[in-house]
Image: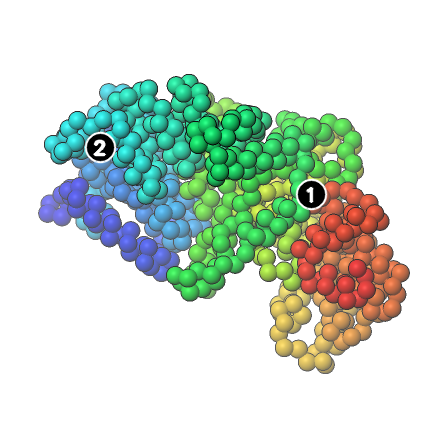
Amino acid sequence: MGRNKRRSRQELISQHEKWLQCLEEYKTNVYYTYQPTINGDFVEQNRTNRKVQLHPANRLSISDLEINTFHENRFLLCRVITKCAKSVALSTVIEDPEGDAERISMYNWLPKNTIPASGLSVDQVSKLLPIGTIIAVQNPYYKIGEDGFSLIRSDYPDQITIVNPNDSLLSEIEWESDKEEASKNKSKTNKNKTADDYRLYGNKYFEMSDFASAVRMYSLGVELDPRNVTLYANRAEAYLRSRQFEKSLMDTEIALKLDPKHLKASIRKGKALLNLKRYEEAVNVFHELLKRPKSRNSFDGQIRREVEQFLKQSEMMNSENKHGEYDYVNIINEFLKQSEIVEDFCEQDWVHAGGPRLNHADYISGAIELKQGGAKGRKWVSKQDIPQHTLLMVSKAFEIVFEQETPNFFILGNKIQTDISYLIPPIAQKLRDEPELGHEIYQLHVGPDMTPGKDLDEHLLKTVDIKRIEKLLLYNAFQQDNGSGSLFKRSSTTDVDINGLGLWLDPSYFNHSCIDTNAERIYLGDLMFIRAQRAISKDEDLTFSYVSPIFAYEKRAHLLEKFGIRCKCRLCEIERAEPLEIHLRRRKILEHFGSHIVPKIFLEQEIYTYELFLIIKALENMISELSSLRKEHDLDFSSIMLVHALDKAYSLTGNTSKSVSILQKIYELLKKHNMYEHSSKFALSLALQHSRLGQMSPAKKLFNSGLYEMVAPIIGDFAINISQNRTKALRIAEKLDPAFIFEARYAGLV
Ligand SMILES: C[S@@+](CC[C@H](N)C(=O)[O-])C[C@H]1O[C@@H](n2cnc3c(N)ncnc32)[C@H](O)[C@@H]1O
């Protein structure tokens, strides 16, 4: 047997810690070859994934496990005692109530495409199953690993249930290691601890930002003295810091019952309410607080100013939430401020400060409603006629990961993009902290293989179900850089180039269409603003495009396939019906454009004058051929980028007059389809071209149109000929594209 024998708890932990250190140091350099099974998952044997009833009679201990045995219909109750590591499987060390420890490898916890090595840091991965999490491993398999030591293996995330500490399953369970810890503590000096001792311990942990331990200490204090107001008030703050807002609110309410005038408990109650999106109640709490006389409870100076600030914020969020009134100029400023690049003194480098998460409220217009319907499932529908550019919805991301928050690796030469595996750990953590959120998030579409959220029972809605989170992200996550909505991408001249991958709940019920959409979205940091793209009639299904219609059919179809969508919009139907030769020819032209012309024109490769003329000729021929391939000219989006390149090439030669007519044609096409994100750019380019030709009157008209088309999707409809409005629009445009507005000023258009 020798090496097969089970290792001690200490050996297991120290071995695992070495492994964690190795992962932290080498990150993606650890490369694994792997052979996925036919269905693509890592499944060792085609064993059953039958659910086991979590009844004490079915419980196993580590000492009951037999090597090479699949313990069908049994479950192992255990607790995580080390941080999780992720290579191919997620691995950690667990203990059972009897005090035995063993390592466990859990497969298929993160999507396959993140393997080899996902690039998630140890801390990010640890959010999946933090230390102390109690799990029930169903149908555990016990085996000898490649290193000759034993391990528990689980192949299906839905076979691992995270057990709530209050679950009745645990009522009879006593953890041996807790008893040992308690007796160790007792044998030390702290035999007669008081509630106040625990308060002080809690405060110490709090100062070290270990909020979970602080909560534990305050709770021990509460057990000794259930009427101790300070303990509840302190625990409320520790809960706030760990973003457990329901629990925080509950503690503030107990504290305020015991002492209705408790200042800190009241402030914390307001903060918890604000975070729970109960804005009006938060306003009332802060408002009441400010009525207090200045001297009371030393309620003046700094604290009073803080409460005034919170009142202001709650009032703002309340009005945003109720009336959809947002201060766009301020929000854009906040966004830019939080997107700034700052100096990292440790690394002696310049880095992004972190993603721009903006503190603003959600809003849903009363003119729309969520309905169940047809083959596409749930959908937003207009309840009345809605004018163009009306604000339909504002939504803050449930969770978002910005590019610069993830290490950008190159594995075998390919940049690994932010993918949904980065979102799974923070969402798992959020649901663990606030299980009530499961109600909302689990209603999202999860594809055909899983039970719909509406059919899940109350208990399942409160569990952390990794497989379900992965699925719902596959169908609902938005990539900000997918060709629509990323506001600052409109300009190649701003420094701001921050994209995130996020989950927005209410916007997830907008269905897709490539063209003929009636809604459009833009992002500012983690906020998504959705407006009516055109005038909408009563009872219309509301749609926006998940992928830009400017993408070629093949690319759109490929992206949409991931959502399980075979799009039936006008554009897709026409393109699908086109003969193969036309497809191939178009693809060939676009490929040639992408590989030969884009680098010269857009990526600023060196270019000689004679080359420029050759490129212009080639582009003219390509544009004319693309146009002849598409009979419905109002749907000829394929040459948009080519026209853009042609315009730039003409500008480089100094021959402006030639680009005007060709730009004009594309501009009209884009405007016809209300594609303002692109049309505004063409209008502004056209304005500059006209001004270069000395045609100031059309130049100014086009400049105004471009300005309107750029700004109206952000702030809503406005009369551009009113000077006050124009000034505001210019202020916003200047932030989005400072270089362009500078040029326009120089050309006398502003
Ligand atoms: C983000 S969700 C949209 C809300 C979804 N209808 C629901 O009931 O939850 C995306 C899913 O909606 C459905 N869907 C959206 N647009 C569609 C379309 N144009 N054609 C078919 N199905 C569509 C697909 O099932 C897709 O995976």
In the image, 444: left or right of 331?
A: left
Report x, y in % for residue 255: 40, 23
Give the left or right position of residue 11, taking residue 55 as reference: left
Q: Which quadrant, please, contains the N terminus?
A: top left
Who's the residue at 59% across and 57% down the image? 496
Disc sitting over residue 42 in the figure: none
Quadrant of the drawing holding the C terminus: bottom right
Residue at the image position 70 percent from the left and 52 percent from the top: 732
Q: Secondary structure at mark 1?
A: strand
Task: Tell how many labels.
Answer: 2
Mark toward the start of the polypeptide (2 vs 1): 2
Instruction: Label 2: state its secondary structure.
Output: loop
Residue 186 screen position, x and y as percent: 14, 30
| Labelled disc at residue 520 | 1
Going 68% across and 36% down the picture, which residue do you hit?
325
**Could you tell me residue 305's position as x and y percent?**
52, 38
Position of residue 21 relative to residue 505, above or below, is below
Front position in the image: 40 or 704: 704
